[in-house]
Amino acid sequence: MSTDTALRPVADTNTIAGLIAADELQPGSPAAIRGLESFLSKIRRAEQLTGRRFAEFAPDLQDALILRRLQQMIGTLQSNPSWAARLAAAGITGAVRDFDQWQSIPLTDKTVMRDLYMGERQGLAVPLSFGGFEIVASGGTSSGQPVETVYSLHELQDTYEFAGEFMGRYQLAPFFDEDAPKWVMTTLADYNLWSSGTMVGGVLQKIPGTNYLGIGPVTKDVFGHLMRYIGPKAFMSITASVAALPELGSELSDDARRSLRVALYGSGVLNARHREELKAAYPNVSILSYFAATQAEAIALQLDPASPWLATVPGLHLVEIVGPDGRWVKDGEEGELVVTRLHAHEAPLPRLLIGDRVIRRPGVAGAGLNTMQFEYVGRSGDVIHLGDTQFSAKRVLDGLGHGLAAIGIDLNRAAREVQFVNDRRNRRLTLLVAADEPEIINRQVGLIGAHGTYQMFGDALIRSLSLFNQGEANFHYLAKTGYHLELRFVPPGAPEINRTAVGKTPLLCDKQQ
């Protein structure tokens, strides 16, 4: 698309917002909702008016069209009795005036999702009897509780196209700069309604100028065959599968190794040990995060390997980072990640709590790209309950890393997997660390004795509280809880570490019984 606007009228916010006409704001029936022009078509018209891609619009122009779409979404939901009652209870009976009023709409958690989108599915704007929908279940990394999301199939295709274009232009283009066939592959596969293979694969298939390989669970021989294809390659999967790439490609030629340009991990954090192994095995690889959820196939993408900040895809979702009051936090502040799918006439779901905590970071600003950024902190459910006090598992882990460094153990480089196990019934909190030669590290930890380990663990717990803003505690408080604190290194693949049905390793396993 040309960026030359010399012969084009300058579009203002009213012109851009007016692309969604007044008579489209309150469709009164499922058939009328089905007849609405897609949000992607509105974005395309805005791009034609300005001669720029939506991601390059000035923020006020982006906001004008997004707010108008949100007004249309609320107008749609007000024709649904369940949603109309929920919105009215929050004081929303007419159009949403601005983003400030938008923030007064109640957040949607997984309980609300179950009530409105499972069973009788009373929250749907268009009933399932119309057909053309897909049902997807949550992977349940933290809670293990299944939650279903309903998508319009043709609206999913719009999001795949829009996200794929952004991914190709702003994330992969710097690494795919040669004149050769370009490949994007993923091992993600659908499993028990957990449809990551379909949804992320849908985005990857739409990256312009690339070829797609949906390989699923793959053997070393097949992976070697694919890596011999001529041209640069990107590999996308969950963190554990990306960490396994060095072993998977252990028999590759040097040329094949050099052809892997991007490794995209789609869940959690890839630790220093795995990064070093990837760099050693694939000398040209850049390691980037592809941040998604079952309810949103592409929330944000890491654009710079040197920075952990993630850039959202403008016009795909409204991404919010909120405090306890449900209102937006400022740059540098931590909050809950909230997502609203903008391309969802038929099954809208405003202000969904994804279940992740992130830090709001300064946005990308300039002629080439304008969008918000955040930094991943951890799962919202990664909270250790000891008595009446809550501790951030991520911050406790960071504290233990500092404590272990003082006795010569680099936790980031030693660990292949980590997991806290909170056995509430027996009052035992254990950090399990999967590492090579765990016996040697356990002996090293043993030199400080049980009391020294308790002091180190307890100090990490206490120090985490001031950062987590949960009040104060001390060793006297920890003693009153009656908890035994244990640090144990185990071999990779040890059965003590709990994993989900799709192979993810939750940071916290909370045994409440």
Image (cartoon, helix red, strand yellow):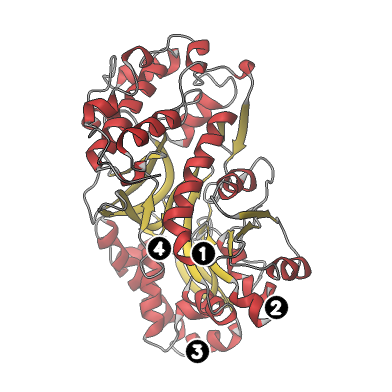
The image quadrant that residue 489 belongs to is bottom right
Tell me whether the residue at label 3 lies in contact with that at label 2, contact meaning CB atoms closer than 8 angstroms.
Answer: no
Q: Residue at left 72%, top 58%?
A: 217
Graded by Cα atoms within 10 Å as few (under 14), some (14 to 19) or many (20 or more), the crowding at tag 2 reads: many
Q: Which residue is mark 1?
A: 176
User: Who comes first in sequence, dot 3 or dot 2?
Assistant: 2
Element under label 1?
loop
Please name the amino acid that badge 1 sits on: Phe
Whether residue 372 sits left or right of residue 138 in the image: it is left
Q: Secondary structure at mark 4?
A: helix
Q: Quadrant of residue 384?
A: bottom left
Q: Which residue is mark 4?
A: 394
Alpha carbons under labels 1 and 4: distance apart? 35 Å
Q: Which label's residue is closer to the chain start, 3 or 1?
A: 1
Please identify, in this view, whether the residue under mark 4 or under mark 3 is nearer the observer: 4
Residues at discs 1 and 4 in contact (Cβ within 8 Å): no
